[in-house]
Image (cartoon, rainbow, N blue to C red):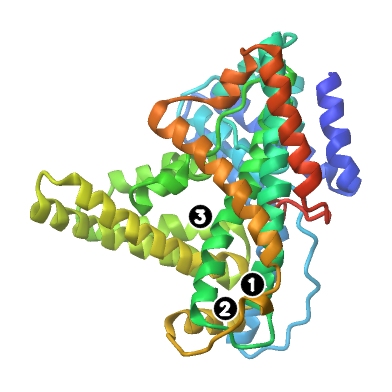
Amino acid sequence: MWLLCASYAFYGYWGWEYIPLLACSTLIDYFCAIRMADSTSNSRRKFWLGLSLSTNLGILFFFKYFYFVSINVGHLLKLDIELESLILPLGISFYTLQTLGYTFDVYLKKVPPERHLGYFGLYVSFFPQLVAGPIERSRSLLPQLKKLEFPSLQLFRKGVLLIIWGCFLKLVIADNLTYFIDYVFFANEQLPFWLYWLAGGLVIIKVYCDFMAYSEIARGIASMLGVRLMNNFARPLLASNLRSFWRRWHISLTRWINDYIQVPLMKKSSSEFQKGLITIFTLLVVGIWHGASWNFVIFGAFHGIVIALWNPLAKGLSHVFKANQHVKKLFGRGVLAITLIFSGPMFYVTDTQLLLSILSEMLHIGSNVISIFDIQGKYSLLIACVGFSILTINSFLEEFYQINVISKLSVSGSGIRFLISFLMLLMIIAFGNFASEEFVYFEF
C-alpha cells in the first residue's frame, strides 16, 4: 500500500490531473483480464481483448497522435484546421504497453489474471520504471511485488552503485554532448560535412547514455526496494549488425514489439519479400512509438529498409567469404556505423525541412573549412569523450570477459567500493552538466 500510494504521489507530482488516465488504464485492463479468464467462449474473450485494446490505444492516440494526424490530414485536404497540441502525459507510452502486454498474455493464457487490484495497480504504477521503463512483463514483476522483502545488503549496495553510474552517464556524458550537437544542427551557418557526421554519431551516444542512465537509476532504486528490474541495454554499440543492435537496444520495447507484432505477422508470411515488408513495418512502429513527428517516421522506415536489405546481403557475404566470419562481422559493423550516424539527425531534429537540409549536407562533400577554435562546445565534448571512454572500458569488460563491474563492486571490500564510488561522485560534481536537462525519453 505504501508503494502504491508513493507511486501515485510520484506521478501526481508531475501533473495530478493526469492521474485518472493512469487509473483508467489500470482498471480497464484489470477487469478485462478477469473477464477474459472467466469467459468460456472465444468470441467473449476477443470482445474483452478488443475493449482493452481500443481503450488503451484510443487514449494513447488522442494524446500523442491526434494533433499530428489532424494537422497532416488538413494539409493534405487543404483544410484550415486550428488545433492546440495537448501536453503528452508522462510515461503514457510505457505504461500503456505494459498493461497491454499483460492483457495479451492473459488472452494467450500465458499468465493467469491478477485478481488483487492493489497488486495489479502497483504493477502498472511502480514508480521507478513508471515514466520511462523498462517495460516489465507481469510474469516477472508481479510475483516480486506480491512477495516484497527488504533487500539484502548486496542488493542495496548494487542499487546505490547503479544510481551513481546512471548519474555519471547522464550528467558527464549525455548532457555534455548537447551543446556541441545543438551548435552543429541548429547553427545559422554552413559547416563542413564531417561535422554533421560527427554530430550524428554523437546523437546516438547521447541518446544511448541518456536513456541507459534512466534505466540504470530505475534499476538502482528498485534494487534498494528489493525488486529486480530487467536490463534494458546489452552493449548495443558493440553489435555486429543493425538487427543485432535492435536486439540489444531498449530491450523491453523491442521484445514487446517482437512478441506481440512481428512474430505473429511473420508466422503468417511465406515469402522473403513479405518478411522484409514486415520488418520495415515493425521498425516503422518503433519509430512512430517514439513520437508523432515525421522525423521518427523517417527514422523507423530507414532502419527497417536497411535491415530488410541486409538479410539477402548477409547471405551473399556468407557465400563469398564462407568460413571467414571476421570479414562479414567487420562489414556488418561498418554498415551499422554508417546507418546509426546517418540516422542520428532523424532522431534528434524534429523540423522536417531542417532535417532534410542536414541530411543533404551530410551527403555533400564540400570544401568548407572551419577552425577548431571556432567550434562551440568543444570543451564539453572533450569531457564527454573522457566519460565515454570509461563506459567503453566497462562495456568491453562485460562483453568479452563477462565481468560486471557493478556486481563485482557490490560484493567487494568496502575500501575499494567506497573509493570507486567517491571517484565517480567527484567526476560527476566536477564535470557534470547540471543544466537541468530532462531525460530524452520523458518526451515519449
Label 2, secondary structure: give it: helix
Q: Nearer the viewer, residue 245 or 37?
A: 245
What residue does disc 1 label?
Answer: 350
What residue does disc 2 label?
Answer: 355
Q: Residues within 10 Å of mark 2 (few under 14, many from 20)?
A: some
What residue does disc 3 label?
Answer: 286
Q: Is residue 129 visible?
A: yes
Give the Cα distance between marks 1 and 2: 7 Å
- Label ID, residue 106: none
Give the Cα distance between marks 3 and 2: 19 Å
Label 1, secondary structure: give it: loop
Label 3, secondary structure: give it: helix
Q: Which amino acid lies under the numbered mark 1 shown in the image of this protein?
A: Thr
Residue 267, percent from left and from top: 29, 43
**Residue at 46% from the left image edge and 31% from the top image edge:** 398
**Residue at 62% from the left image edge and 21% from the top image edge:** 228
Residue 247 drawn above or below residue 403? below
Q: Nearer the viewer, residue 393 or 68?
A: 393
